[in-house]
Amino acid sequence: MSYFLRVGVVGVALQLLWLPAWAQRSGVTAGQTSGLTVTILNPPKHLETTAGPCCTQPNVVEDDQQRDSLDLDQDGRFDVRFTASRYYLFTPAAPGSYPDVRDRRSTTITLLHNDVQLLLGGRYITPFAFASGDSLSATSGSISAYGTWWQYSNLASDLYSSSASRLGVGYSGYWSTSQYKYIGIRLRAGNRWRFGWINVQIPQLQPTPTINIDSYALQSTALAVRQVTGGNEQWQLFPVPALDHARIQFRQPTSGELCVLDALGRPVQRTTLHQQTAQLLDLTSLPAGMYAIQLTTTAGRSWQRLQKL
């Protein structure tokens, strides 16, 4: 089993902003071939950055990215993009200050449209590394209760990455070993889903971030999704988008906590609820942008998106 790592003072992992209102078992296991259309990449896709000079050009950004995309269902539209990236910036000391180094080495996956989702581990925007035979499910025992299907496109998710500065170094992601692991994936087909996996290896971050993609598979037949009652059906947020204020209406008296999260998953506003049927959110102090409204009660957590104009 792989583990999510956060080491040092600069290790940063983005919190999950919003969750879909479903959580069901896919019936597919990592590495399964029966009932799936399997594509073997021969040779495997290989992404590796250049090593690049270090510390030789002060105040000059060294940014190398190697990318490749997959059309998982072969419909002519790319579904996911993998990126191996190396970013380096050395800033010499100015009078009265310290020299600084920004060194980020990352391997990421990005969803390219809203009809594809990947299975996260924990409460972070980080795909879980499944071992062969693991159940690809948001309720799988091999991940925490916060694991869910992520559907937000055009936002890179760390497979395994490091970030260093003069303050320290931090790591994020589940691909901390050099073994091949599986990403849980699903593609929308009408009102149904095709579940499957992508077999990925991160052999190294140093000196050159590297990604190898060996194969991928999707169910030959799409499965219906059972909608889970509760969650966002129990409260309404309006207007969307909003200018200075937004209102939440609950179907029944509700106790718990409302939290407004910014685009990085950071709490910017909290409100405690005591058997309330409605709540007004004051947005006047928040800059324009996308936010997530998170409701936490004894029954669990649910999210809704909100755009602030």
Image (tube, grey):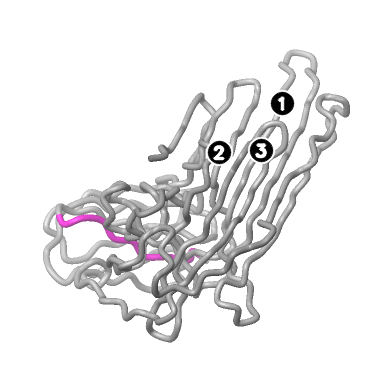
Residue occupying image coordinates x 21% and y 65%: 278
Residue at 19 percent of width and 52 percent of height: 256
Reply above or below: 212 against 98: below
Q: Which mark is residue 105?
A: 3
Specify the segment rendered in magenta. Answer: 299-308
Image x and y of residue 204, in percent:
63, 36
Q: Earlier in the sequence, mark 2 or mark 3?
A: 3
Looking at the rendered image, the disc whose residue lies closer to the viewer, 2 or 3, is 2
- Give the number of the disc on residue 178: 2
State the residue in front, 164 or 68.
Answer: 68
Q: Residues within 10 Å of mark 1 (few under 14, many from 20)?
A: some
Under circle 2, the secondary element is loop
The dot on residue 142 is none
Between the C-alphas of marks 2 and 3, the distance is 16 Å
| Amino acid carrying mark 2 in the image | Ser
* Quadrant in the rendering for residue 215: bottom right
